[in-house]
Image (cartoon, helix red, strand yellow):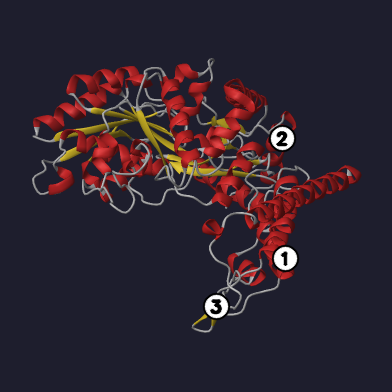
Amino acid sequence: RKLTQELNAVAFQTLVTDTFTARYSSSRMATNQAEKRPEELNGPSRKSPVIVDGILLDRPLSDPKAGEQFVQRAFQIIFEEAIRKGTSVDEKVCEWKEPEELQDLLDLDLVDAGEAPEKLLERCQDIIRYSVKTVHPRFYNQLFAGLDHHSLVGRYITETLNTSQYTYEIAPVFVLMEEVVLKKLCALIGWQCGDGIFCPGGSMSNMYAMNLARYKIFPEVKKRGLWDMPRLVVFTSEECHYSMMKGAALQGLGTDNVYVVKTDERGRMIPKELEKEISAAKSKGVVPLMVCATSGTTVFGAFDSLPEIADICEKFGVWLHVDAAWGGSILISRKHRYLLTGIERADSVAWNPHKMLQAGLQCAALLLKDNTDLMKNCHAAYAKYLFQPDKFYNVCFDTGDKSLQCGRKVDCLKLWLMWKAIGTRGLEERIDRAFACTRYLVNEMKEREGFQLVMEPQGVNVCFWYIPSSLRGKEQTPDFWQNVGKVAPFIKERMMKRGSMMVGYQRHGTKVNFFRQVLISPQVRREDLDFFLDEIERLGRDFQPE
């Protein structure tokens, strides 16, 4: 194994060196060609140095060669520490340190004088060492995990080119690419046409949808604001993402005007309760603005019944938004996409490929069925310094005015490159494998003493309690559940300090703390799932109630 690691390191060093050598050669060739260009292209050369305010302008402020060498060495550290070690089960998921200790170790203060490259490289190593390795096969803590190497290269390119996704003139490749990717996502939903945009996270996608729903029925709000608006209400489930509350607060609707609809025992919105809530609101003169259904709730991974909810929205003429930030990627699986049956009837959909598809943070799309430029009309400010109508190319490719942002990071390349690498069928395999891992884990839990499911999973969220031996047989005692609620924090602390794996826990309603295991990383093997169960048992073995 050590020999293999050394060979990998040598191979990587050779690859990087060859790449940079080729780049240097290309650069020198380009320089030689540039020297032969006409003077009108290069401008007249100056023999004497130019100094302005005591500053020499005849050469770059920093040394490009030194910078390239630093990048080369830093990439080697990234490859070794973050990629190779970060994805190895022989390494820790995290090297836990308390905040005060970590601050001392990292020396985070910013000072007047710069540091030497060697010191900076040491800092790079420390940053990686003390960061959580979310690419680790035993990281199950969030709704994102794993590493796709092609997507990672896409992120490298994006960061290196450092452009903004607002006009064709500065992002020609990415403007075209984003349109292709968004069209593909719309087609998977079942729309023949549509619109969309990549947003900085699913929360913003939900807020976009809320704003668009309001503009659709009250376009005058863009100019006149809320002064003449009736009371507008958003309907969503008890299990909705908290961004619905934040969106209502941000847009001036008020959190009191987010009506929470009851859910069933599986965490799914009850359509009859939704209809009751809308009817009651209308009877009071309130205007129903939007219904937000959820395809893949954060904790339970529940999927609302979209056909029934869509019928109700059509009956009352209400905008239907589906928050499929978590579950949207299941549309790629022919075997499991039934969970989102009816999503094609939505007016808007939030979908985060950085979650179940491992596209890398962040990659979040808002998709619209509308193809009448609703998004542009709602958000456009027509900044003359960016969106000149008399450009020499077709300005319909200047899509930035659809966004609430000005500068907007390129989020399409990492998804596009990954999709190109493994294809739709490769993405489908990831989804199907995640479901298979979930089924295996659930079946194993049922065979082991002490593991108790909160509910059977609809998707890939496995919610469970672990009952240590000290509490078994005491289910009828008055403090049983109170003590069970202390088990998850007890195990989580030990897990973090040991660095063996990471999994989240939470209280929920009347339910005491339980674990939520999320299985989406393509790096996860059966051995990792067995280890997970063994480690929960090992860490909780000596728990004693107070």
CA–CA distance in space, label 3 to label 2: 63 Å
Q: Which mark is residue 50?
A: 3
Q: Amino acid at mark 2?
A: Asp
Residue 476 in view here: no
Mark 3 or mark 2, whichever is nearer to me: 3
Amino acid, disc 3:
Val
Check whether the beta carbons of the residues at disc 1 and disc 3 lie within 8 A of each other.
no
Counting from the top left corner in percent of width and height, residue 16 is at: 76, 49
Q: SS class of the residue under badge 3? A: loop
The image shows residue 71 at horizontal and vertical percentages of 69, 58
Label 1: which residue?
Answer: 122
Q: Earlier in the sequence, mark 3 or mark 2?
A: 3
Compared to 433, does 511 lie above or below? below
Residue 518's spot in the image, x, y percent?
Answer: 57, 35
The earlier-in-sequence mark between 1 and 3 is 3
Q: Secondary structure at mark 1?
A: helix
Mark 1–mark 3 Cα distance, whole angstroms, equals 38 Å
| Residue designated by label 2 | 528
Q: Kindly identify which numbered label has been placed on residue 242.
A: none
